[in-house]
Structures are given as structure tokens and as C-alpha cells.
Amino acid sequence: MTAAVDDDLWSAVGDPTRRRMLDLLLAEGDGTATSLSEQLPVTRQAIAKHLGVLDRVGLVHATPAGRERRYRVDEAQLARAVAQLSSVGAAWDSRLRRIKRIAEAIQRGKDQRGIQQ
């Protein structure tokens, strides 16, 4: 694998609510816990906790905006996450190709034994 896998990063994006939040922030450019909670079926407090997780791993950054904080996706960190996913995917593709070759060889052996009988 070319990129080291960051378990904290993948734990953060492993949650479907956090992935949806990232989608919304990317689409809108930025957002607050309140604005995100209006678009998702979770409370503002839950959104704030999810944003804290995303902030700790560097996927979002907050800036004060009055009584709230505006969150924006860190595109460099997101690109790092995508590179990790691509690397993991390529490694699994390679493993699966090897497994397929082994299974095909086993099947060919069985077929040949069936012909010889």
C-alpha cells in the first residue's frame, strides 16, 4: 500500500451520519451544527459531537461565527482519506485476483481428475 492507513481517520468516516455531514459541507461550502441538524435526522447536540470527531481527525476545521462555529471540510485531509481508500482497494483487488487464480486452479484439478476416472 502506498498510503499508511489512519485508523482514527477511518473510524471517523465509518459513521454514515458523519459521511452525510461531509457531503453537505462539501456541497454548501461550510455549515454550522444548527444548519446541519436542520438537514439531518439527528439533534444539534449529536451533530456537534460528530463535528468534534471530524475536527479531531482534521477532516473539518471550525471558525467562530457569532455564537456558533462554521465548519469547512479540509480538502487536503479528505484527499488523503481518498488516497488511503484507493490504496486499500487496490490491495484487496490484488488479493482477490490471487484467490480467484487459486480457486480456478483447484477447479481445473478437479475437472482433470473427473476426466481421468
Image: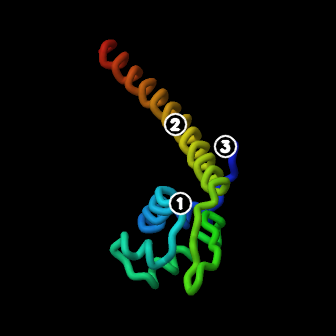
Q: Please provide percent x and percent y for residue 45.
A: 46, 84
Q: Please provide percent x and percent y for residue 37.
A: 40, 76
Q: Quadrant of the C terminus?
A: top left
Q: Quadrant of the N terminus?
A: top right
Q: Please provide percent x and percent y for residue 52.
A: 58, 77
Amino acid type of the residue that numbered disc 2 sits on in the rendered structure:
Asp
Residue 80 left/right relative to 100? right
Amino acid type of the residue that numbered disc 1 sits on in the rendered structure:
Gly
Q: Residue at x 61, y 43 (%)?
A: 87
Camera-nearest label, 1 or 3 = 1
Q: Residue at x 38, y 25 (%)?
A: 107
Q: Residue furthest top?
A: 116
Camera-nearest label, 1 or 2 = 1
Q: Please provide percent x and percent y for residue 90.
A: 57, 38
Cα separation between marks 1 and 2: 34 Å
Whether residue 14 is visible to the viewer of this picture, yes or no, is: no
Q: Which residue is tagged 1?
A: 29
Q: Examine the image and state in which quarter residue 105 appears.
A: top left
Q: Which residue is tagged 3?
A: 1
Cα separation between marks 1 and 3: 32 Å
